[in-house]
Image: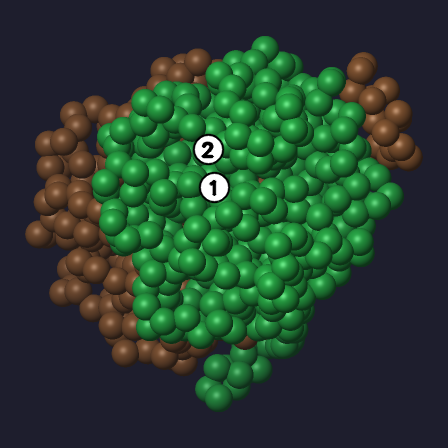
Chain colours: A green, B brown
C-alpha cells in the first residue's frame, strides 16, 4: 500500500519485498452471494472458498438501551470470545495451505487464544509470544488449554510483535494482523452489519494494533464497489488515553502517529504503543470521513458497566472502549459500536461484592426490601 | 406431570398446586415456521411470539475430530457463555409479562450469570443465591458485572435452591429450571440440531439439576408430533461420579435417584446432589431408550483437554462431561454432545505453564526445534 508495487497472490507474502510496507489483498473475482452462516457465508468475497471453522461470526447485533440509534455488535459471542476468530478462520486456513506446520503470534491475549484454538483444530503447532504480566487471566488460560507453547518476554506487546516480525517468520507462519490474509476474515463483520441494518452512519471500533478498523472498512468499501450500498459509514477509532498514538496524533493534526513507549491502560487488549497497521487505520478513517478519539480508563470502565447493567452485554474493558468513544463523541444517527471481546476474558477487571445470609429469614428480609 | 391435573397457562404457576410436583408446558398452537436467527427463530413453537433477546442460540455445531460421527453443539458461544441464555430469553420475558420486577435464582454460577444479564436487559432487579466457595470465578464476576445482588450462603447448591423454592417465590419471580417456562427456551437446541443434521442417533447432555436434558427431549418430541422427524434420538445423561444421583440409581436399576448430600466434582456446574427436575430427566431417558452414565473427574478433564487440543473447542469442565460420557459409553452412529458452557467460565480449572525467552536468539532456538 505504500510503494504501489503489485504482486500476484502468495500466502507467504506478509510485507512488501520492495519497501517493507503493508500489503493489501485485492479480490478480483468477488461477488455477493451469501450462503450459510458465519464467516464462510461470505466465501464469494474471500480469497478462499472454504476452510477451517469453529462456527465463528454470526454474532449478535443488539439494539442498545444506552442511546437512540446505537447498536452493539457483540463479538464476544465468537467461539473463543473475541473478534479474532473471524481472522483466524481465514488465517489458519491460509497457513495450512502454505504448507506450514507452525503458527506464531505475538499477542496481548485474544490473538493467542484464537490462534491456539484454530491451530488445534487444524492439527498445527502454535507458539504465542506474550508480554509477562500484561495478559488477562482468561486469555492466558485459553492459550494453555488449547495446547499452545506459551513464550513469555519481559517487555510489552510491541516488543513481542517485533520478535515475531523480525525473527519469527523464518521459522513459523505469522498470524498477527500485519498478515493481510487474516484481515480478510475480519472484514466479514461489515457484511453482517450490512445484512441486518444496511450501512450505518458510523462504525466505532477499539483500536490497538489497528488491523480491525481497516478490515471492517475494507468490507464496507467492497460492498460499495459491488453497488450494494451507496452511502458508506464513517469509521471512528477509539484508543485508551494511555495508549493513544493515533488519537493523539489525530487531535494535533499530525500525519504520523505519536508512538508511545510505555502504554498504560486497564484495557489490556489495546495496550499497544506502536500499532503496526497504523497506515491502514489512518487511511480507513480519512477515506471514510471519520476520526480517532481517546477515552480515559474511567470512561472505559463506566461504559463496560453501563453495557452490562443496561444492555445485558458483558464486554472486556477494551471491548467497551468503542461504547466509551461513542458516548464521548456524542454521535447521532445509526451507529454500530463493535464490542470486540467478552467480559469473561478478564475476570479480574470487575470488583465483586456479596451479601451473606445465614438462614431463610435473612434471605426473605433481603428480598422484601 | 405427577398427578395428571391440567391447568390453564399462568406465568405464576411453577409447581402443581395440587401435588406440589413439576409442571409440563403444552403448546397447543405450535407449528413449524422457523424465521430469523437464534431462539426466537422458533417463536411458532414457543409460548410467546417475541421477547427479550441478546442474540442467544444459533450456536456452532462442530464436526469433531475425536470420533467418527461425533458433533459438538457448542453452547459456550451464547452471549453469557452457557446454554442458560436460551432459557433466560424466555424466562425473563415471562417474568416481565407476569408483572414481577425482581428475579431470583439459586445457582452454581451459569444461571446467575445469565439471569443477571437478561434481567439487566429487561430493566429488572436480580438476586442470585450462591454456594460460597463453589462458584467458578468467571461466573461470579458476570453476576457482579451485570449488577445482580449476590447473596452467599454457607452450604451447597441444593440448599440455595431449597431457599428459592420454599421461601423466595413469595417475593420475587423464580427462574430456576423447575420453572417450566424457562425450559421452553432450552428446547430450541433440539430445533437447531434438527435443522442442521436431522435427528441424530444420540444426544448426550451433562446432567446437574436435570432440566436441560428434558428440555432438549421435549424439543425433539415436538418435532416428531408435527411429523417432522420419524426417528427420535436416544438421550444420554452424564453425571460426575461424585455427584451422580441419577446415574448411580440407573446403574442399580432403581426407580428413584440416590440423592447425594455432599456432592464432589471439579465440574462445579453439575455439582448438584438433589436434582429438582429428576422426574423429567428420567422420563426423557426412558422414553427415548437412552441411559445415564457417570464419569470420573479425570475423565472430564481429559475430555476438556481433548476437545480443546483436537477440536479447538474450549469447554468448562461440566461442559466437557458430555464428551467424557460419549467416550466412555463408546457410542456409535451420529451423536451430538452438548457442550454446555465456555472454558472462560472457569479459568482456574486449567494449569498454565510457560517458557521464558530473554532475547530473539532464544525465541529462534525455541522455534527451530
The label shown at residue A267 is: none
The label shown at residue A184 is: 2
Relative to the observer, which residue lies in front, A167 or B329?
A: A167
**First reached walking from the N terminus: tag 2 or tag 1:** 2
Q: Is residue A153 left or right of residue A70?
A: right
Disc 2 + disc 1, Cβ < 8 Å: yes
Task: Name which residue lies at 79% across and 41% down.
Answer: A159
Residue B275: % across, % down: 46, 51
Q: Is residue B312 left or right of residue B117?
A: right
Residue A95: % across, % down: 57, 20
Q: Is residue B32 above or below residue A64?
A: above
Sort mark 2 into few (<14), some (14-19) or many (20+) by Cα contacts within 10 Å: many
Task: Name which residue lies at 54% across and 61% down.
Answer: A292
Whether residue A90 is visible to the viewer of this picture, yes or no, is yes
Residue A74: % across, % down: 44, 53
Do pointers 2 and 1 mark residues of a single chain? yes
Q: Is residue B316 above or below residue A365?
A: above
Task: Name which residue lies at 28% across and 78% down.
Answer: B99
Chain assignment, label 2? A
Task: Name which residue lies at 63% across and 66% down.
Answer: A252
Q: Is residue B186 above or below residue B178?
A: above
Q: Is residue A1 left or right of residue B333?
A: right
Relative to the observer, which residue lies in front, A55 or B113?
A: A55
- The secondary structure type at the circle numbered 1 is helix
- The secondary structure type at the circle numbered 2 is helix
Q: Is residue B297 above or below residue A239?
A: above
Quickly name the residue at label 1: A215
Gap in angstroms between the C-alphas marked 2 and 1:
7 Å
Amino acid at each position: 500500500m505504500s510503494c504501489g508495487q503489485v504482486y500476484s497472490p502468495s500466502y507467504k507474502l506478509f510485507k512488501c519485498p520492495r519497501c517493507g510496507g503493508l500489503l493489501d489483498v485485492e479480490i478480483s473475482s468477488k461477488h455477493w452471494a451469501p450462503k450459510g452462516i458465519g464467516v464462510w457465508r461470505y466465501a464469494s468475497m474471500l480469497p478462499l472458498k472454504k476452510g477451517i471453522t469453529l462456527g465463528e461470526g454470526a454474532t449478535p447485533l443488539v439494539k442498545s438501551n444506552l442511546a437512540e440509534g446505537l447498536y452493539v455488535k457483540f463479538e464476544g459471542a465468537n467461539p473463543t470470545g473475541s473478534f479474532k476468530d473471524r481472522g483466524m478462520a481465514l488465517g489458519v486456513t491460509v497457513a495450512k495451505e502454505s504448507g506450514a506446520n507452525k503458527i506464531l503470534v505475538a499477542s496481548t491475549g485474544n490473538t493467542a487464544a484464537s490462534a491456539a484454538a484454530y491451530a488445534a483444530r487444524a492439527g498445527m503447532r502454535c507458539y504465542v509470544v506474550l508480554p509477562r504480566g500484561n495478559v488477562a487471566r482468561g486469555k492466558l488460560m485459553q492459550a494453555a488449554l488449547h495446547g499452545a507453547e506459551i513464550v513469555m518476554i519481559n517487555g510489552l506487546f510491541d516488543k513481542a510483535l517485533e520478535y515475531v516480525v523480525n525473527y519469527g517468520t523464518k521459522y513459523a507462519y505469522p498470524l498477527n494482523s500485519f498478515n493481510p490474509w487474516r484481515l480478510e476474515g475480519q472484514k466479514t463483520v461489515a457484511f453482517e452489519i450490512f445484512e441486518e441494518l444496511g450501512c450505518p452512519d458510523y462504525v466505532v471500533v477499539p483500536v490497538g494494533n489497528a488491523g480491525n478498523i481497516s478490515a471492517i472498512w475494507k468490507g464496507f468499501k467492497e460492498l460499495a464497489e459491488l453497488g450494494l450500498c451507496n452511502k458508506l459509514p464513517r469509521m471512528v477509532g477509539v484508543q485508551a488515553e494511555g495508549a493513544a498514538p493515533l488519537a493523539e496524533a489525530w487531535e494535533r493534526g499530525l500525519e504520523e502517529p505519536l508512538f508511545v513507549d510505555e502504554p498504560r491502560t486497564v484495557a489490556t487488549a489495546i495496550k499497544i504503543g506502536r500499532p503496526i497497521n497504523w497506515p491502514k487505520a489512518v487511511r480507513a478513517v480519512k477515506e471514510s470521513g471519520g476520526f480517532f478519539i481517546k477515552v480515559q480508563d474511567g470512561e472505559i470502565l463506566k461504559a463496560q458497566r453501563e453495557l452490562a447493567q443496561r444492555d445485558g452485554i458483558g464486554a472486556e474493558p477494551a471491548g467497551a472502549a468503542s461504547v466509551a468513544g461513542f458516548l464521548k463523541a456524542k454521535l447521532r444517527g445509526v451507529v454500530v459500536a463493535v464490542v470486540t471481546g467478552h467480559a469473561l476474558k478478564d475476570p479480574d477487571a470487575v470488583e465483586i461484592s456479596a451479601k451473606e445470609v445465614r438462614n431463610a429469614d435473612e434471605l426473605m428480609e433481603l428480598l422484601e426490601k
